[in-house]
Amino acid sequence: MSISIIGAGAIGSAIARLLTNTGLEISIANSRGPESLKPLVAELGPRARAVSLEQAAAADLVFLAVNWSKIPAALAGLGPWEGRIVVDANNPIEAPLFKPFELGGEPSTQVVARMLPGARVVKAFNHLTPNLLANPGAEGGKRLLFVSGEQADAKRQVIELITQLGFHGIDLGNLQQGQLAQFPGGPLPALNLVKHG
């Protein structure tokens, strides 16, 4: 399964390190083009390569880790998605003000899914800070990562990847239920929960 990341900020870079440290090959893209990613790719090593947004969108599994306000521009012109998995690692809030975007009570991933027609969208990797994402193991156990989505098979594949990375995946249900792990508003974001045994 080919894996890519759209977005090379704190979360995108943390996910890239996690994947390459586990021995997986990845491609990564941002709005500024592959040249701007040379320092990050050099740090990540031979398992990572910088690509265009179009190339990143062609992977079997695509992590979307872009500031909320920049998601429409990042996804413009990409696709067709043809059943590929997109992991939405975003929250409807961004620095420096951390003021929530008004979505009228709709889960943020449903908003994102409308920009990804044909994709199987799974919400995951959004509730932990980058430094916690970098360390799957904690206190002799495994950190929990929450997963939500509408397609059971897509969630299963993401949970298998989460397990491979050293975390313990918890299926919260559909995207509406996934709001439990959405920041702001849900009770689960930033909770550093660890499964033992």
Image: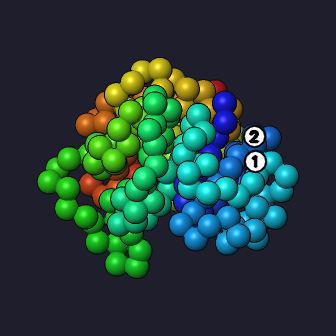
Instruction: Name the quadrant containing residue 160.
Output: top right
Task: From the top left corner, tell me how far across and down residue 6 is, in percent.
Answer: 55, 54
- Looking at the rendered structure, the number of numbered marks drawn on it comes to 2
Instruction: Name the quadrant containing residue 122.
Output: top left
Instruction: Name the quadrant containing residue 152.
Output: top left
Task: From the top left corner, tell me how far across and down residue 108 is, in percent.
Answer: 30, 50
Picture residue at 38% right of the left edge, 43% below the top: 116
Quadrant of the drawing holding the C terminus: top right
Picture layout, residue 181 above or below residue 175: below
Picture residue at 28% right of the left edge, 48% below the top: 111
Q: Is residue 136 left or right of residue 155?
A: right
Picture layout, residue 31 above or below residue 173: below
Distance from disc 1 to disc 2, alpha carbons, whole Å, reads 5 Å
**In the image, which disc is placed on residue 24?**
2
Q: Is residue 81 left or right of residue 109?
A: right
Q: Amino acid at mark 1?
A: Thr
**In the image, which disc is placed on residue 98?**
none
Q: Amino acid at mark 2?
A: Leu
Q: Residues within 10 Å of mark 2 (few under 14, many from 20)?
A: some
Picture residue at 40% right of the left edge, 56% below the top: 76
Q: Is residue 57 left or right of residue 116?
A: right
Identify which residue, 132 or 112, lies in the foreground: 112
**In the image, which disc is placed on residue 20?**
1
**Looking at the image, which residue sits at the far right?**
46
For the question of whether residue 133 can be seen, the reply is no
Identify which residue, 93 or 167, lies in the foreground: 93
Is the Cβ of the residue at disc 1 closer than 8 Å to that at disc 2?
yes
Tell me the SS state at disc 1: helix
Quadrant of the drawing holding the N terminus: top right
Snapshot colouring: rainbow
Picture residue at 61% right of the left edge, 49% below the top: 55
